[in-house]
Amino acid sequence: MKILVAEDDQLTRQGLIDIFEDEGYETIAAANGKEALARFVEYEPDVVCLDIMMPDISGYDVCREIRRTHEAVPILFISAKSEEIDKVLGLEMGADDYIVKPFGVKEVVARIRALTRRQAHTQKSTDKRFTIGDLEVIPDELRAHRGKTVIELSLRDVSILRLLAENKGKVLDRDTLFDVCWGLNYMPNSRTLDQHISQLRKRIENDPKHPAIITTVHNAGYRYEG
């Protein structure tokens, strides 16, 4: 799933890109409104993240132009403009949500997951729910269910769990996990993978110290025994 990130401040833009890519999204960067519109036409992103005060063309105008031809694509404004009238104007322009700078990582993650779920419900989805261990994973919701317990997941979490479930009993080495769940262009780093698996275990395992869903095969990779 692709996110267009239009933000003129390089540090903020890179910060947002890092957050979204860590969640498992493919990102497309734009430094101003003109670039944002060109990137939108070229890449047809699934979600658009817009700053408002950008050179050449404002975020408001970018939103208005996108809405002329694409009514359903989710648009998220992230702006330093914090007055209520600014939020109301952004939403009236057609945006789906509005975050005020400075923002927290958890807030951005929660909002982008909500937009992703909302979009999945408006489209015909090809993602099918699956089970792994005692979990039922519902990709469209970015959630897993254990009985009445609901566990929030990222796109990458879902990708990892699906790959393990589809290869039950097989050892998946780090290169395979990186290629499928991070992408072929990602520079492998075993610590990145191990840290992600560790955090995922804390949310999905009944006993993270003795995992039953994602087991480590030393010097080889990870496996779901089934």
Image: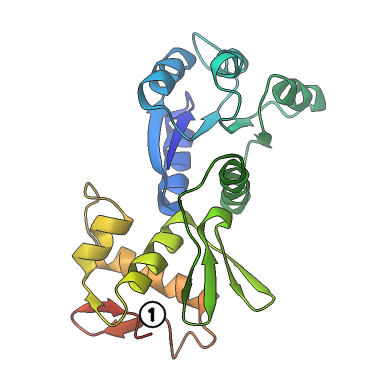
Q: Amino acid at mark 1?
A: Ile
| Spot occupied by residue 177 in the image (x, y as percentages of width and height) | 27, 64
Q: Nearer the viewer, residue 20 or 92?
A: 92
| Spot occupied by residue 188 in the image (x, y as percentages of width and height) | 22, 58
Residue at (61% x, 40% y) in the render: 122
Above or below, 19 relative to 91: below
Q: Nearer the viewer, residue 217 or 132?
A: 132
Residue farthest toward the bottom in the current orientation of the protein: 210
Above or below, 49 relative to 85: below
The answer to whether residue 92 is visible is: yes
Residue farthest toward the right in the current orientation of the protein: 84
Residue at (28% x, 57% y) in the render: 180
Which image quadrant for residue 218? bottom left
Colouring chosen for the image of the structure: rainbow
SS at badge 1: loop
Above or below, 111 relative to 32: below
Residue at (69% x, 19% y) in the render: 93
The residue that disc 1 covers is 214
Dot 1: few (<14), some (14–19), or many (≥20) neighbours within 10 Å?
many
The answer to whether residue 31 is visible is: no
Residue at (41% x, 51% y) in the render: 24
| Spot occupied by residue 117 in the image (x, y as percentages of width and height) | 59, 48
Taking the image as shown, residue 37 lies to the left or right of residue 50, namely left
Tell me the quadrant of the picture where the N terminus can be found. top left
Tell me the quadrant of the picture where the C terminus can be found. bottom left
Taking the image as shown, residue 186 lies to the left or right of residue 21, namely left
Taking the image as shown, residue 203 lies to the left or right of residue 185, namely right
Taking the image as shown, residue 19 lies to the left or right of residue 185, namely right
Q: Nearer the viewer, residue 82 or 143?
A: 143
Q: Nearer the viewer, residue 144 or 22?
A: 144
| Spot occupied by residue 76 in the image (x, y as percentages of width and height) | 60, 33
Which image quadrant for residue 142? bottom right
